[in-house]
Image (cartoon, coloured by chain):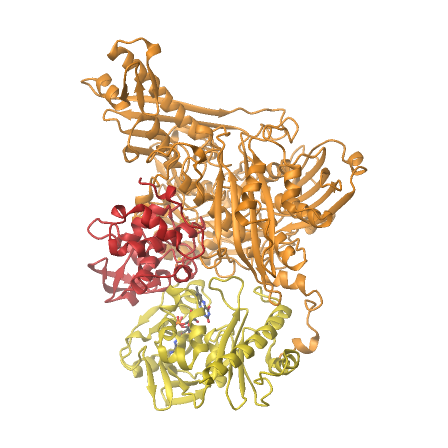
Chain colours: A orange, B yellow, C red
Amino acid sequence: MNVEDERGAAPRASGVGATAPRVGGLERVTGRQEYVADLPHADALRVKLVTVDAARARLKAIDTRSALAVPGVRLVLTAADLPRPMPRFGPQRRDRPVLADRETKYHGEPIAAVAAETVDAAEEAAGLVRVDYEELPAVHTIAGSLAPDAPLVQDPSLRPGDPLANSNVLREHRYGWGDVGAAEAEANVVIEGTYTFPMVTQFAIEPHAFMAAPFGDGIAIWSSIQHPYWLQRVIADLTELPLSKVRVFAPDPGGAFGGKQHAKYEPLLAFMARKTGRLVRLVLTLEETFQAVRRGAAQVRVRAGFRRDGTLVFRDIDANYLIGAYADIADRTVAKGSYTANGPYRVPAVRIVARSVLSHTVPSTAFRGFGNPQQIWAVESNMNEAARLLEIDPLELRLRNLPRPGEAFIPHETPADGDWAMAVSRAGEMIGWQQRPSDGRGRGIAVGLKSGPTTGLSYSTVRLLADGSVVIHAGTSDMGQGARTIFAQIAADELGAPLEWVTVVMGDTAVVPYDQQTSASRSSVLMGNAVLGACRDIQAKIRAMAVRLEGVPESDVTVDRGEVRLADRILPVRDVLVRGLGRLGGEVIGVGEARKEADPEHPLGGTSAFYEFNCTAVEVDVDRETGDVTVMRHVTVSDVGKALNPLQVRGQDEGAAVMGLGHTLMEHYILDEAGRIRNLGAIDYRIPTSMDLPMRMESDAIENADGPGPYGAKGMSEGALLPVAPAVAAAVCDATGVAVRELPLSPERVWKALHPSLARPLDPVEATPR
Amino acid sequence: MRPFEYERPSELAQATSLLAEYGPEARPLAGGTDLIIRLRDGSLRPRVVVDMKGIDELDGDIRDDDGYLRFGALTTMTDIAADSRVRRDYPALAESALFVGSVQIRNRATLVGNMCNASPAADTAPALLAYGALIVATGPSGTRHLPLEEFFVRSGVTTLARGELVVAIELPRPTSSRGSVHLRRTRRRGHDLASVTLACAVTPDGKTRIAYGSVGPRPVLAIDDSGRLADPSLPDTDKAGLLDRLFAGASPSPTSMRASPEYRLAMLRVLGLRGVKAAIDRLASAQAP
Amino acid sequence: MTNRRPLELTVNGRSRSIEVLAHHTLLDVLREDLGLTGTKECCLVGECGACTVLLDGHSVDSCLVLGVEADGASVTTVEGLAVDGRLSPVQRSFLETGAAQCGFCIPGQLVSAHALLTDAPHPTRAQVEEGLAGNLCRCAGYEQIIEAVLMAADAADADAIADDDLAARSARLRALGDRAATPDAELAPQ
Ligand SMILES: Cc1cc2nc3c(=O)[nH]c(=O)nc-3n(C[C@H](O)[C@H](O)[C@H](O)COP(=O)(O)OP(=O)(O)OC[C@H]3O[C@@H](n4cnc5c(N)ncnc54)[C@H](O)[C@@H]3O)c2cc1C
Ligand code: FES
Ligand code: FES
């Protein structure tokens, strides 16, 4: 990426704004970084889940005798071993049972679990658990779930007082402003389309791993989890222990992408640990991760009205998200993704309806972009179709409708917090938008907006040790976004320590103070501010020391960026520290807190702390005979407020862009008619490799220091994924004249769109084998 | 993975007698890139795995052998793709070997294993068919040579008899110049199992040998000796009709999730035309002074 | 259960003599029997490359090799790339370009990169893309990973990247194909 010098002064070597090397990088390049599966576990019982090969089944009987007879097997836990009623949990609703409760509701839902001395024994025994079941009809499409005679995914008794309890709609969200009906009259052109987004999965290269063990008079859990404190609460509730007796260890996850936000099998392991009195350990197979986490599929109908000059006059959006059998955090992804579905546009009348539709499928959950990519795919594709129809340049069409910095674009909501037109123009310049691409190629552009956290609470303690080195406690999970580095840079800068002298302690709820969660690209902003606050706390104490040591008035001393400024000279913080601590040594402790308060009146419970905004422009080449789409150029520009570490900003943007290319070009679950996932695992679920990159990828960041985080930073790391699909689809349309409204844009799908007559099913002669 | 016995015989006779004794309960192991996956997913549950890498008579060499280029049972895709004789005389084989999996896979995967696994999508099969490969099989009752066309039955099944092992694959040395190429279709540019795989070879006598896979239960060889396919001046529209006849052996599965039958057949046609054209071009440049 | 079989092999230069079960893979042996957890486990079907190690100098997916097959062989894992506590050029360049995000794929990427640079000390960008295609990175830091490999190739002669002339290196990077180059600012002295 292009690091402009508009930042002004040259960055300091390793402080904020510099390309400091990753904290934890050395461990990662030497194989010493320990993920959950790497922790010592010699004495652990190995756990294997028992499932049935059906999407939905009534469980009649479970016979565990042969399984228990396998040497080394210590426990086969079934629902009968759990308290009654079945303990349930979930971040939005307590609807997910620890083990399937009389009925499995999706392909891969565990109905029992084996714990044995070896993996081999656990696997063998799991295969010997005999389950007598009756397969039941399953719903696994939006139409199927919404059909009047569809079987109910959730028992209405789990949804007391819910008027929708007798349907598969978990919740319907309605947002909007203005009078869409009246606005329609003012539109010269109305464009309507329905856009489909498939089920895709996070596919972190580290499969989820969990351990649990009795620990003192409480319990310890190890998990590759993004939200350790949330997990702590879930386990405390289920085990009826006080929070202080539940210790969650959360080593850095090996990629998470939202899929590791919330509890999955930790509750099961907690019960198994208590039952056996042993350390129990479960590492999922990649296939099992596909059955644990995914993104919600969606079908979005968009109607948009424009004046002939391209001014948007209304938007009417109706979205159905296919979530899974349990809510997990899926309904929140629907709410948040839909609340901003109109995107970063100034539109007088907007109506948004979005439903969370239950189905007999893997519970969908958070996934980079959190419910927004589905809406952005639809709305931005619709926008590009409008540009074609109106014969207005799609880049220009956006500029005409984007709000200016500070302008309200959603009533009662955080106004535009960035110069978004600048990002669009930058993307245009970078790809050379004004020159037409060479023959046969097509160009496309799209923007994406996502609201950041709506509430938040992060604490940090920072300890300035006697020699000037620093220990930071921060409850964020560093899952690859590089949170450790950012916090270390902030502290290094503010306390005047070399970066290598800073240690960041994370991932232990007994040691590190509370953090609400690691999601919504919040950590640089919220935890960043908490760390900064803790540093300021220390600075105040250093200032008091300086006043005392130098005998000068308080007003003559300021402490900032590692320096103690007196009227006549500047001292390093460390100097003052060493003298101030004196003979006994010790340390200076700072405490920081960052809150984003809730707003009970707000439809989302709070306004957006910031927005992530990205503009993506691509150039593609389409092989008309095969349907192959090759991205020749990919330009991605994010408004980050301030790049605290440009190297990491680039990594996040390019990584998000490539992930976006995955769901744009190749990724999707393939279900059979019974609702089972056919392409479980890495062989038939394709994600981009190093050979699937755009021929040329460029990223850039807009830095106007207009964010709420440290030094004007905003959250980032999801933005560059948001508009990839509509940008690529627009480019395909530009090249071929054909608009594809369903993802992924696989060669076969593009080919079918280009050759509708050839794509009919084969005539019988051809289909007969020789 | 389920437990099994592991044997690592040092003589071919030991291996074949183990295989004869255990029959379907024994499995030869070469590079393991197919076998170990199937042992793990439980679709194969042999009692004995017979590792062939310790057998003195078997090797991974590529040898010139009296009118043939001979690939030992342990020859890997990496070695094939790098071999200058293969690249010069059998470019479609070198190309197809390079398509197999990733570097890590190609370092283990053997050419013979690719045949014995008998996947319809086996990438090196069309090239070997187009070049007229022979399978050399040794069993309790001796050694026999059979044309590769007679080797495949259906996915995972070959005509090997109980106790038989493939000890080598032989390719006849080219008797004239030849233009040949391998093409395939996948869902991404990075390694992937082919939804159509095709090799085409044309010779100055006007013969076109075209072999294709992943569009039916086994790879198929078809030959045009009318001279018309190989004719550079015949327009594609005419060739399409000729090719359709050669592709009569294609019957893609309607239930595959990698591609629909109509897409596979359409791509077979596209690859057919592209393959013929590329082979003709290569022949022309081979003949250019 | 089946009996254990003796296995003698050299791992990262150290000879090891253990007993293993025949159906356990080299990956199982490394992680469980030898406690070398740097080699990672993900797909178990040869697709992701997280388990990549060198077996007699060739990169292989250790999830597709039985432990017993490695009898008499020499194995190098990520833990063996640094020599005498000194990072290899490619390890250093991975740090420098920020190639490691979550880091889970990185051991496999490094072993593949190491194998590639042994075979092709001065690879083209296309060769690097191809050479690493068997190593999935879901954080998809591919651009920075590829740059790191190219940088290590460049620095191999100079040996110590840290002492290399930064400006010259960034100019070389810029010259690598028509891809976006890394401007000097990103290579500023740390
Ligand atoms: C990630 C990945 C990607 C792949 N990509 C491709 C691809 O793109 N194209 C492709 O064609 N294949 C691909 N494969 C499949 C596989 O790599 C090839 O089929 C390979 O050539 C098999 O050779 P092997 O030595 O590993 O065989 P093994 O796994 O050792 O054996 C395969 C089968 O053949 C039998 N067998 C082996 N040798 C003999 C013998 N001498 N006599 C009798 N029977 C024998 C075995 O018992 C077994 O049933 C891929 C595999 C993986 C894991
Ligand atoms: S774990 Fe071996 S290749 Fe994925
Ligand atoms: S760094 Fe996370 S998967 Fe590659």
Q: Depth check: give the residue in front, A406 or C104.
A: A406
User: Residue A660 at x, y = what percent?
Assistant: 53, 49
Left or right: C37, with C101 as reference point:
left
**Picture layout, residue A67 above or below residue A501:** below
The quarter in which the N terminus of chain A is drawn is: top left
- Residue depicted at 65% across the width and 34% down the height: A160
- Residue depicted at 32% across the width and 49% down the height: C168
Asked whether residue A208 is in view, the answer is yes
User: Residue A265 at x, y = what percent?
Assistant: 46, 44
| Quadrant assignment for ligand 2 | bottom left
**Residue sitting farthest toward the left:** A583
Left or right: A263, with A472 as reference point:
right
Left or right: A68, with A668 as reference point:
left
**Picture layout, residue A448 above or below residue C34:** above
Looking at the rendering, which quadrant does residue A573 occupy? top left
User: Residue B255 at x, y = what percent?
Assistant: 61, 67
User: Residue A167 at x, y = what percent?
Assistant: 70, 42
- Residue depicted at 35% across the width and 61% down the height: C123
Asked whether residue B17 is in view, the answer is no
Q: Depth check: give the residue in front, A679 or A86.
A: A679
